[in-house]
Image: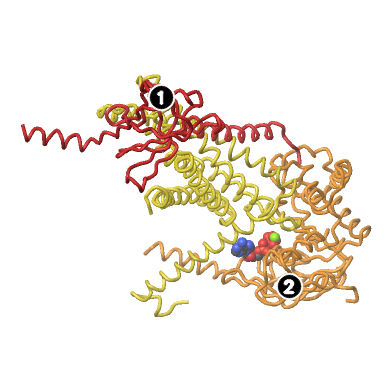
Chain colours: A yellow, B red, C orange
Amino acid sequence: MQSRFDQGAVGRIVRLGRKGCDVMEALGRAGLFLGQSAIGVPSREGWYLWLRQMHFVGVLSLAIVIVSGLFIGMVLALQGYTILVDFGAEQALGQMVALSLLRELAPVVAALLFAGRAGSALTAEIGLMKATEQLTSMEMIGVDPLRRVIAPRLWAGFIALPILTVGFSVVGIWGGYLVGVQWLGVFEGSYWSNMQASVSFMNDVGNGMIKSLVFAIVVTWIAVFQGYDLVPTSEGISRATTRTVVYSSLAVLGLDFVLTAVMFGGL
Amino acid sequence: MKRSKTVEFGVGLFMLAGIIGLVFLGLRVSGMSLAAPSETFRLEANFSNIGGLRPRARVTMAGVTVGRVESIDLDTEWYDAKVTLRLDNDLEGQLSRDTTAAILTAGLLGEQYIGLSIGGDPEVLEDGDTLRDTQSALVLEELIQQFVSNMATN
Amino acid sequence: MTDVPFIEIQDVHFSRGSHEIFRGIDMLIPQGKVTAIMGPSGTGKTTLLKLIGGQLTPDRGRILVDGQDVHRLSRKALFALRKRMGMLFQSGALFSDLDVFENVAFPLRVHTDLPDAMIRDLVLLKLQAVGLRGARHLNPAELSGGMARRVALARAIALDPELILYDEPFVGQDPISMGVLVQLIKRLNEALKLTSVVVSHDIKETLSIADYLYLLADGQVVAKGTPETLNANQDPRVSQFVHGEPDGPVPFHYPAETLYSDILGATTTRAR
Ligand SMILES: Nc1ncnc2c1ncn2[C@@H]1O[C@H](COP(=O)(O)OP(=O)(O)OP(=O)(O)O)[C@@H](O)[C@H]1O
Ligand SMILES: [Mg+2]
């Protein structure tokens, strides 16, 4: 519908408004989608479907998360040591490694790795099921794909990422111990006791877990919705997969700032 | 649907690893203790300045950790800091009444902790007693200020 | 028609974007009979089946299945209605994470509480009917197109539905399996009094099993009747389709400007 509203400055505003409406509509659809699929009591069959997805998004992501955690912990210790040693405060190494990992690095890096490893795979898998009409044929058999295909994947993601984050922290702290204590010679007792004196289970471990849970919900939601909502062609699938990684990464980093401000920024 | 034992086992192991990891973060990293509260006893100590002392800081004797700081409150009667300590039960009835508590710093900028040194009084401290003889934290700024003003007067 | 209608399609309009696919079609599909829907490729036969199954919603008009308006049902009621339908998809649409056996067992497992042994027997019977009992351990990726469609057929009839919608059941079948499928559709219809809707291009096979036919073209029903009346129909559009003549009033081409102006237009654009 061409009219004079489509031209000039007015046209730009009209287009902006239309874009805004599109975005709101997409958000609404995504929200409805989350509500419809995540809520409900799983059947016995549903438990097993969830278990299989846990294996796929959780167990199979463990290796990359563990290896990354180890290296990040080791690098933290190395960098931290060279800075702290100038102040004669290398005993504070354990505290620095543990707090950086628990509050920031473990939730964020694990979520980014999760988006790349599991999120993109979820999008592609669901997208392919849509493109080959598997979802439609499931509907025609009288089974709701939101409950059967989407819900187990959502719940698996919600639970797997916090567990992966715990693994990341533990391995990272151990990596920091290897470099700091075993290699650079920080006194072992002060590595742990300094850490224990400054890390609070509620504030640091707890807030880190809350962050990780929020990231888990957002990343899995984006991944699954992008798969369910894509244009069912091979190009549509590849675009949706890219969007999953880009949107989840941006969402994780942005939300991390907001959550950090609320949790540790004294807001 | 076909059930795969390896999948079930793998997921079970994965969740177990998550729980063990969380326990590790609780015990080893945040220093929570599983020991029952009955195995400790409580002492109080007032300090005019605690510096950077925080709850769950170590309490040591001769460098050996013997307990932790339980809580720190402002004593509104004296307007100083009331620090509650939890010490190992072994020490109940062993510390003389004139035991001193000092807030010390590990290294120049390290964590702050409480060091206890025993006195000679035959009377001993029991659960809930207060340490009379305390030594506050050294505050670096105050030290520097003193040093500078000493220099000036000399 | 004196039969009881199982599906009533009343004045259905449907368009995708600016492309009008249906411009007011009416159909009555009788209970317990085989009704064939034919028409040139791209006229919207698959779309019509999806409208009946409630996956698409018409812009205007309504579709009643067994007296219920498909597009006014609650989600729950719609899923309950779909349990009584089987649909054979043009692409097969087998679940890629399950093997052949589990694909056919799927409707039984989700909708019945039958013991495993009984499910096994039922599945093997259905697979036997389509000649693929020996392929039960294969994955969908290991099947040929024609085999996949036969497995999909076995899955569609697994629950013994009251209504089966077949989208191109004969495509990609060799003459032998084609004959078997024709017999199978006929037998299901006669033995179980199923209502069947068959979409197909294979005139000979379709005419041999259909009790009633609808011919779609250009967004409308252009002819309907029993195979005999349709064979005798003098309408050039009908006889062109029924006798498979390339030239005639039914366009073979998707709507477009004339080839001449298209090519000429392209040349002038390139020249510029
Ligand atoms: N998802 C879609 N988006 C847009 N247009 C579509 C879509 N699916 C089908 N169409 C259009 O709808 C029309 C009818 O498609 P449909 O698949 O129903 O045809 P058909 O009669 O089943 O053809 P065939 O005999 O080749 O299977 C086609 O012209 C096609 O271009
Ligand atoms: Mg079709």
Q: Position of residue A37 (x, y in %)?
A: 64, 55
Q: Which residue is mark 2?
A: C237
Q: Position of residue B125 (x, y in %)?
A: 44, 29
State which quadrant residue C186 falls in. Answer: bottom right
In this view, the residue in front, A151 or A213, is A213
Gap between marks 2 and 1 measured at Cα: 114 Å
Using the rendered image, report if marks 2 and 1 lie on a common chain: no
Residue drawn at (53%, 46%), measured in percent from left and top?
A213
Quarter of the N terminus of chain C within the rendering:
bottom right
Quarter of the C terminus of chain C within the rendering:
bottom left
In this view, the residue in front, A202 or A162, is A202
State which quadrant residue A119 falls in. Answer: top right
Q: Which residue is mark 1?
A: B96
Q: Position of residue B137 (x, y in %)?
A: 29, 34
In this view, the residue in front, A210 or B81, is B81
Q: Would residue B33 be visible to someone looking at this image? A: yes
Q: Is residue A81 above or below residue A123?
A: above
Tell me which amino acid carries mark 2: Arg
Q: Position of residue C110 (x, y in %)?
A: 78, 51
Q: Secondary structure at mark 1?
A: loop
Q: Which corner quadrant of the figure contains ligand 1?
A: bottom right
